[in-house]
Amino acid sequence: MAAYNRSMSIPLRELQFDLFDVLGLQHMWPEGPELAPAVLEAAAHIAANSFAPQAAKADIEEPQWVDGRVVLPAETAAAQRALAEAGFLGTAFPPEYGGSGLPFTLSQACGSIFAAANVGFYSYSLLTQGAANLLLHFASDTQRAAWVPAMLAGRVFGTMCLSEPHAGSSLADISTLATRRDDGRYLLRGRKMWISGGEHELGENIVHLVLARTPDAPPGVKGISLFLVPRFTDSAARRSNGVSLVGLNHKMGWRAHVNTALAFGDAEPCVGELIGELHQGLNYMFLMMNEARVTVGLSAAAIGFAGYQYSLAYARERRQGRSLAARSSVAQIPIVEHADVKRMLLAQKAWVEGALDLVLYCARLVDELRLPTQATSVDAGLLLDFLTPIAKSWPAEYALEANKLAIQVAGGAGYTRDLPLERLYRDNRLNHIHEGAYGIHGLDLLGRKVAMQEGAAFVLWQDRLQQSERAAESFVDLRTEADGLSAARRKAVQVTAELVATLKSGQAELALANATLYLDAIGIITVAWRWLERARTAATRLSTLPVEHADHEFYRGKLAACRYFYRYELPRAMNALEFLATLDDTLLRTDSREL
């Protein structure tokens, strides 16, 4: 079984195909094709040596609360040091803060390698990068200088403190209070729940980004401000700042990453600094939340990819049964030759490769936002806003399904702890709830993103799909897929118009009753678009490649997965859209007492 463990990483050939062949990163980063392989190789080395070997152990040896402190396996700190020393915390950050100034797309590609190896270890870095990025955008020069370089060096870690015990996703109901002191800083008092990385000894300090309201703040989300609250007032002296550990949450997955309940100002004063302006906290936090949502999708795709790679290696080695065409044969055949096993493997391939490409496409949009051309950046921002709920939710749903099929491919062994597949499934199951439950993102997509700026983002989405359809028409083998995407797009536009009209007519409950189904359908169509782009790229490469070339099967695999997606997955989106057009009110008519 040890040989299979080596196959759980995302192949670097796969990432280079997406980055340069499909996404054309070289047009924004000319030196990319030359430099990227070395960066990806370095990431793969750290993942293979510091992350993957500890994944099973960290899953068993969960964080423990000892004398008011969190105790983690020693390997956790070693992995964080390896990541920081190699510069991967600051890959996409400006050099003046200790970063490397490389494209965000490359940073995400490296992140997928780490997440596939051990998502619990990597998530400490994810949160710290997100917090540092928020500080770069909205903090004062003094705050940025004090914290960002230390965060990118791996000495200080970051968190986001949003939810409270009585207010999970309902941020309008948070009650943590921030009272202004004479020196301009604030005393915080309140409790926060589900704080990932909230307490540990991995670095010198932890920067908590805390949502709170001032005594005179307006009600609801308009009265929320954002505060920078360090764990220690002095990192070297480890002087407490009134942030205390209340308890640990033991989740079904991501067990290597500590999840906490924290109290601010319970036993002693807790001092924080205002970030930006008063009552703009939620707007600021949305930068980190939306970045986290895309990285949740990245983690989901990566974990699904790890399961797929493992089950594929297993299926090629495991012999059982005989060919139906030659039952008298004495020799058993590898299970990869059985049609139903091919179905499960092809489904995994189509889901996880499509999901990873979608997330990397979103990362490329982030890089486009940095371009000086205003029109380009405006379009990139709009499209990124539209795709964010899809990029979080679709991988969380379908990469999880991929992990389920990976278990099935391995048969009875897949359900045991002897193989990593059940652990990967548990890890991926959490991505459904991370950064907002699935249903919340359906409401966001249909209730907000589709209609924002008079539907401009939705029109951009349509335009990108149409461009792919037209580009694929010149490939005889892809005309069926191009026609299929065109039909799905037109149906989506029609049904969306009907739902938005219903919403504007004052029937919000009816329009949004099946928003989750809408999210699923638009997600499938979006990934179908990404697969058409990938297949067109593969077909172009194949047209000039000799059959004996090593990459021939690689590109043919892209065409096979695209064909599967359009025949097995896209029809489900069409069926869902047909149902949505009926404005079915079953859920509204069901009395809660009938459940």
Image (spheres, rainbow, N blue to C red):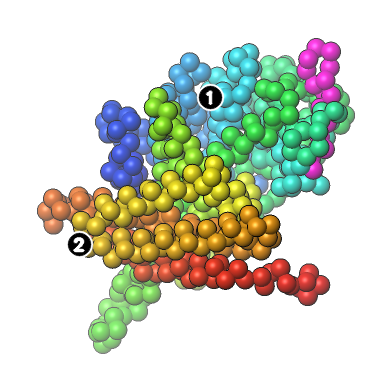
Q: Earlier in the sequence, mark 2 or mark 1?
A: 1
Residue sitting nearer the eye, 177 or 74: 177
Q: Position of residue 155 (x, y in %)?
A: 59, 23
**Circle 2 crowding by C-alpha within 10 Å: few under 14, some 14–19, many from 20:** few
Magenta extent: 173-188
Q: Which mark is residue 476?
A: 2
The circle on residue 152 is: 1
- Could you give the CA–CA distance between mark 2 and mark 1, rounded to whole angstroms? 49 Å
Q: Nearer the viewer, residue 219 or 549?
A: 219
**Relative to 486, is 265 above or below?**
above
Q: Position of residue 217 (x, y in %)?
A: 81, 30
SS for dot 1: helix
Q: Is residue 67 above or below residue 140?
A: below
Position of the N terminus, as image quadrant, is bottom left
Q: Amino acid at mark 1?
A: Leu
Query: Residue shown at 78%/46% (left/top)?
Result: 167
Residue plotted at (58% across, 34% down): 287
Mark 1, other Cα within 10 Å: few <14 / some 14–19 / many ≥20: many
Please report the residue visible at 55 percent of the width from the left and 28 percent of the height from the top: 133
Question: Where in the figure is residue 518, as x and y percent of width and height?
Answer: 55, 60
Q: Is residue 95 visible?
A: yes
Kind of residue sitting beneath label 2: Val
